[in-house]
Amino acid sequence: MANHKLLANRAASDAAYYRNKWREEQDRMLAAQQIIQELKTQNRKLRSMCKAAASEIGEVWESHCDHMGNGPVDLMARLDGKLPPDLYPSFDDA
């Protein structure tokens, strides 16, 4: 009978341990989801700001073109995903 109680206590202890681990994992998942949502919101705001800046630059196009004639249209295309974003890879760390 004592062995039976010992096994029951051990099972209850194991169940509590794994319940706590599951709760901890759920908390980590919720925190990660919140961070992802915050980053998506920040990304959307930054893209919006970049598009607004490109629009303003477009108003004075010639003064903002490089030696090859690339200007705000390229920037807008990159922001919209129509051109690759890594035009100047050396500036990635800036």
Image: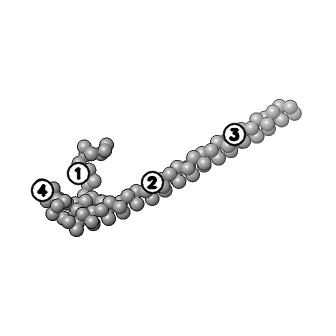
* Chain-order first, disc 4 or disc 2: 2
**Position of residue 33 in the picture relative to residue 5 (left or right):** left
* Chain-order first, disc 3 or disc 4: 3
Residue occupying the point 27% across, 45% down: 91
Image mark for residue 17: 3
Q: Give the answer, above or below, for where 91 lies relative to 6.
A: below
**Distance CA(mark 2)–CA(mark 1):** 23 Å
Image mark for residue 76: none
User: Where's the C terminus, which quadrant?
Assistant: top left
Q: What residue is disc 1 on?
A: 87
Image mark for residue 39: 2
Q: Amino acid at mark 3?
A: Tyr
Q: Secondary structure at mark 1?
A: loop
Where does the image place residue 78, in percent across and percent down from the top left? 27, 58
Q: Residue furthest right?
A: 1
User: Where's the N terminus, which quadrant?
Assistant: top right
Q: Amino acid at mark 1?
A: Leu
* Chain-order first, disc 2 or disc 3: 3
Where does the image place residue 45, in percent across and percent down from the top left? 40, 60
**Distance CA(mark 4)–CA(mark 1):** 13 Å
